[in-house]
């Protein structure tokens, strides 16, 4: 059996996190190394590795993950000024945790292109 990722440990509560939102589909918590004034990670409770594997998830779970991201951003008060959502995959994407997660970044002006 493969070792649990840090996010599975956060989901089961064996590692503490600064939770900002939870419902039956998603769990959201503040990133330990924030890259913006608001930096929250949203994970679906149904595990998949990344965007590369999300197509194996059922459509309802994917839809609830996306809706969860939107709900968390709204609850954080980010809708008016805007925000960025990032899903990293693999080496070039600099994914470091092998459990899909959306970064919600807000509270400052973003730039483009990203680094
Ligand atoms: P990735 O690079 O995989 O897209 O993003 C992983 C994110 O998880 C990073 O931004 C990193 O700071 C965050 N992270 C890693 N370990 C922990 C942890 O134990 N707690 C929290 N809250 N965030 C973590």
Image (cartoon, grey):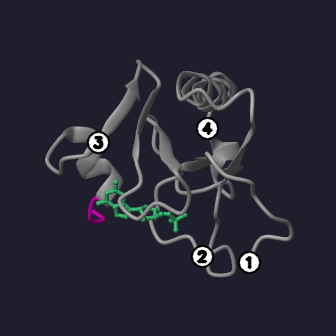
**In the displayed structure, does residue 111 sit left or right of residue 55?**
right
* Magenta extent: 1-5
Q: Which mark is residue 94?
A: 2
Label located before the other in sequence (4 or 1): 4
Q: Which mark is residue 115?
A: 1
- Reading the image, the residue beneath label 3 is 18
**In the displayed structure, does residue 20 sit left or right of residue 88?**
left
Q: How many marks?
A: 4
Of the pair 6 and 30, the residue shown nearer to us: 30
Q: Residue at x 50, y 41 (%)?
A: 42
Between tags 2 and 1, which lies in front? 1
- Image-quarter location of ligand 1: bottom left
The spot of residue 76 in percent (x, y) is: 53, 29
| Numbered disc 4: secondary structure | loop
Q: How far separated are the C-alphas under marks 4 and 2?
A: 22 Å
Label located before the other in sequence (4 or 2): 4
| Numbered disc 2: secondary structure | loop
| Label 2 CB less than 8 angstroms from ligand 1 | yes
State whether the magenta stretch is mostly helix, strand or loop: loop
């Amino acid at each position: 059996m493969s070792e649990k990722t840090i996010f599975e440990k956060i989901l089961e509560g064996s590692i503490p996190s600064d939770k900002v939102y939870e419902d039956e589909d998603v769990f959201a918590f503040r990133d330990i190394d924030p890259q913006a004034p608001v930096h929250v990670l949203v994970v679906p409770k149904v595990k998949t590795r990344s965007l590369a594997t999300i197509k194996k998830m059922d459509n309802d779970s994917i839809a609830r993950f996306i809706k969860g991201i939107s709900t968390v951003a709204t609850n954080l008060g980010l809708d008016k000024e805007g925000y960025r959502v990032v899903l990293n995959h693999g080496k070039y994407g600099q994914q470091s945790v092998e459990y899909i997660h959306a970064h919600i970044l807000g509270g400052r002006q973003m730039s483009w292109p990203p680094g």
